[in-house]
Amino acid sequence: MRRRGLLSVLPALTLTLFLAPVIAGLIGTWLPAFGYLPALGGDSFTLAPWAMLAAQPGLGESLRLTLLSGFLATFLAFALTVGFLAACHGGRLVRAVRGLMAPLIALPHAAVALGLAFLIAPSGWLVRLVSPWATGWQLPPDIATVQDPNALALTLGLVVKEMPFLLLMTLAALEQVRADERLAVARSLGYGPVTAWLKAVLPAVYRQIRLPLYAVLAYALSVVDVALILAPLTPPPLAVQVLRWFNDPDLSMRFVAAAGACLQLLVVVAGIGLWRLGEILAERLGRAWIAGGSRGGNGRLARPLAAGLVQGLVALAAASLLALALWSVTERWRFPDALPASLGLETWARQAPHAASVAGTTLATGLLAAAIALLLVLGCLENEQRRGLTLSNRALWLLYVPLLVPQVAFLFGTQVLAIQTGIDATWLALVWSHLLFVLPYVFLTLGDSYRALDERYARTALCLGAHPNRVFWQVKLPMLLRPVLFALAVGFAVSVAQYLPTLFAGGGRFVTLTTEAVGLAAGGDRRVIGVYAFLQALLPLIAFAAALAVPKPLALARKLTVQPA
Amino acid sequence: MSVIELATGQGLTLSQVEIVHPAPGGVRHIIGPVSLSVPPGEVVTVMGPSGCGKSSLLAMICGTLDAALEGSGRVLLNGADVSDKPPETRHVGILFQDDLLFPHLSVAGNLAFGLPAAVKGRRARRARIEAALAEADMLAFYDRDPTTLSGGQRARIALLRTLLSEPRALLLDEPFAKLDVALRAKFRSFVFEHARAQALPTLLVTHDPQDAADAGGPRLQIDADGRVLGGRASGRGHRPGGTP
């Protein structure tokens, strides 16, 4: 309990840094939703914004699209994750797919969505590959495969991006619940492999992945950038509609937008509540099923099916990236040619000056946000260890707050606050707004590894006469170099992918690869979109590659050190 | 003469040391009260069933007691009360079941980590490390990656690292448990010889009666509730109810 210096105030500082804007933002959104925003003449509380919101045409359809895509995408991602792990547990395929998950998670949502649109659109690569020889189409068919009326393209895009996240979280949870032993016991009692997994492993694992699952649901119910690219736009899902109202030149629409943002939050809260009800129901039915004694089959059918679906999704993500790259170097590609007629770097050359400046902003914001987040997280974890604290479940929920609360539900309030404090459209506001979302991911990525390091190393070092700071810099950090760099890469990737925070905090002054690519999606040239979206995907991938490559030379350099601190 | 210099004194003394775990449901007793004195060069063995608090006792002595636990009583080193001192200024070396060599440092890097900063100059530090390695017949391992060494070699490097830090007492938390029988006897003599040569008061925690027999010194027997039962040399090592 000694040495209460800067370190001991870090947790409070960190919590304030990332919870205060969320809380202030929520207040700043709820007040206008009830008519209070003096800057725009709203001096008294009224329900008028809600009445105006209810009267907006297409609100019901927006809600339907939001709920349909949100629930369907979350359920499919979850079912695929569980199905794949139950059918293929311990196999080589799981190990191979696990290796691919990090780069898949690193890919920004918008880049995957744009690549997917390039693939599945009526004039997309997939149709071109089978036309006209198999379909007879000389012109793109009149079928809405992107921006379809049931938002199925949006659902697919979300599944492609969210399944890797859930899969990685579940794989981490499997180690904690000693899945291999549970499975061995169930198998020895005569259960088939898939049934054994579902009956003996899933109930324990589910508890561990509940929060990540809620985060996925909250995200899917409130996503903006992917929806702008893949969802129908007349009317769009609720979150996109709310953004439109916020951007309406008629300032009185800010009140409707604020009410819409609150409705978006209520949708997410109700959505999570509904999912919880589903959990309770599934638990009741599941108990009876587990106790029923049915042993299940040998999983021969389930294995290729689950493996095929997951491999298909991975292939789709990879093909999306390839489509972006190909379009960025395309000079001429007429429908229905399977490949471009001519390739060249003309688009890259033309876009280079602007792309360099946009990439620079993206890089600087990402590196700053990730580095600050890493410093705060390392400080909090070190403080936790020195003071022998453990992270309670309640604290974990706090960490998830920015991931569970829809961005559109509080960023407007945060923007109002930023304007009032005079930091609107500054680097400070931009990096801070990214930090809100970067920090939880850095904490979640690094926390387990940091706590898993055998504490006896630190004890031994202390007993050798090393000051705790020296133990931190010379023992813990070098031993944790890989997870630390990995967390930095995750933080950077999260920052690169931010769309709404850049839009709101940047105040139009800051353009990142994500805002540029999503902005171009509305009707831009595929070649130009290809350049920006590919760059957007490339930056996080480079960060991950660097995180994996750097530790070796650093470790070698330290091997011969004999000098004291 | 050994290359490892050591301060000598009156040894390690525990006075009414007791550890408890304050929990919402009430205070749980972990171990104690323990009162004993270990003169320089003597090895006192602490034996008892798993979970009786032996390791917590060692943690209390070297100042790294888990924050969830609460310790009382006094720890004295060469007559000075170190109970409130941070671990890095107590000069109490500890060896665990695992060697815990830092994998990102070479053998020499690990030894240099233990060597006090007061030994100045690259050449002087290198000389001390080389002399220590030579004494253990391991000079050839100077630049080696510790992860490439055998279990016995790693264990010896871990001991050298601790001795180079110039401790005033040595705590051994089952350091022989993971070694095979032949290696175990060899390493045991290596540790005890060095502890005696450096006149280090040494506390050994073990389950193995052979370890205790080789240690030769008094034994302290702890029961499952963490209470001191005494032992073969309880009159000398442990004085129930009183300060030594």
Image (cartoon, coloured by chain):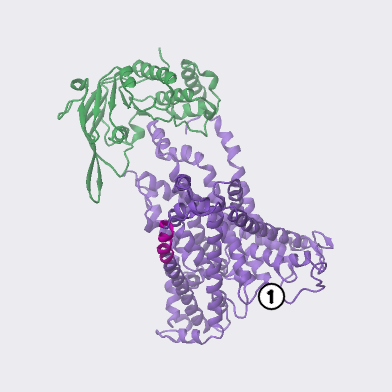
Chain bearing mark 1: A
Quadrant in the rendering for residue A500? bottom right
Tell me, by letter, which chain the rendering colours purple: A
Tell me, by letter, which chain the rendering colours green: B
Which residue is nearer to you in this view: B184 or A549? B184
Q: Is residue B44 above or below residue A247?
A: above
The answer to whether any part of residue A511 appears in the image is: no
Question: Is A173 on the left or on the right of B89, as rendered?
Answer: right
Number of dots carrying numbers: 1
Which residue is nearer to you in this view: A169 or A304? A304
Magenta stretch, main secondary structure class: helix
Few, some or many residues within 10 Å of mark 1 (<14, 14–19, 20+): some
Question: Is A313 on the left or on the right of B161, as rendered?
Answer: right
Which residue is nearer to you in this view: A357 or A385? A385
Q: Is residue B121 magenta?
A: no
Give residue A474's position: percent from left, percent from top: 48, 37
Residue at 53% across / 65% down in the picture?
Answer: A75
Quadrant in the rendering for residue A269? bottom left
Q: Amino acid at mark 1?
A: Ala
Please report the bounds of the magenta region as a residue range.
A280-291
Which residue is tagged 1? A144
Circle 1 SS class: loop
Which residue is nearer to you in this view: A117 or A460? A117
Q: Residue furthest top?
A: B1
Give residue A422's position: percent from left, percent from top: 49, 69
